[in-house]
Image: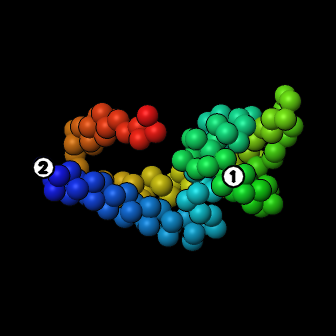
């Protein structure tokens, strides 16, 4: 049994690795990175969100997200504005919205290719199965 779960864990990681490499390559050609596009996507979903929420949404530490947000600001892709108290809110600029849209088109192409071997029913099942995995190592 332990061998089986290790094989499964590696298969999931391998699929993720291939997907990320393909996305990184295509996004780089468009002048952005997967981390940048993912941050723009998170900000687009929740305009005005603080770094803590965006860090969680992008699977990063607050410090890492803060560094990334600084780069995105320098590139003119986001604005950081004061919020309530010490909160800093994040918003896309028009250039950020354009980069996000380009990233969406690229991601759609890459992910369609990545999952082409799976039928719609297979993809639906995979989403459901992955959603059942509950990992809380901090508990």
**What residue do we see at 74% from left, 45% from top?**
92
At which x and y percent is residue 31? 64, 67
Q: Residue 26's x, y, as percent?
A: 50, 67
Q: Which residue is pictured at 66% across the width and 55% down the height? A: 64
Q: Where's residue 36, x and y in %?
A: 63, 57
In the displayed image of the protein, which residue is found farthest to the left? 1
Horizontal relation, residue 34 to residue 2: left or right: right
Point out the tag, 1 or 2, that comes first from the N-terminus.
2
- Number of numbered discs present? 2
Q: Position of residue 90 (x, y in %)?
A: 75, 41
According to the picture, the residue beneath numbered tag 1 turns out to be 63
Report how far apart the C-alphas of labels 1 and 2 lie in the structure: 38 Å
Q: Is residue 100 visible?
A: no
The residue singled out by tag 2 in the image is 1
Residue pushed farthest top?
A: 84
Above-or-below relation of 1 to 124: below
Front one among 133 and 17: 133
Q: Which dot marks residue 18?
A: none
Q: Secondary structure at mark 1?
A: helix
Q: Is residue 118 above or below residue 71?
A: above
Q: Report which quarter residue 20 is drawn in.
A: bottom left
- Labels 1 & 2 near each other (Cβ < 8 A): no
Q: In this view of the protein, which residue sits in the foreground, 124 or 84?
A: 84
């Amino acid at each position: 049994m332990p061998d089986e779960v290790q094989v499964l864990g590696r298969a999931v990681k391998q699929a993720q690795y291939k997907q990320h490499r393909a996305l990184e390559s295509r996004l780089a050609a468009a002048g952005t990175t997967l981390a940048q596009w993912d941050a723009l996507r998170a900000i687009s979903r929740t305009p005005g969100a603080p770094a803590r929420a965006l860090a969680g949404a992008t699977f990063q530490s607050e410090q890492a997200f803060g560094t990334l947000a600084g780069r995105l600001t320098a590139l003119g892709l986001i604005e950081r504005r004061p919020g309530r108290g010490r909160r800093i809110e994040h918003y896309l600029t028009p250039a950020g919205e354009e980069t996000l849209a380009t990233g969406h088109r690229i991601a759609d192409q890459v992910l369609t290719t990545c999952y082409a071997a799976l039928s719609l029913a297979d993809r639906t099942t995979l989403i459901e199965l992955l959603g059942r995995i509950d990992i809380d190592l901090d508990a």
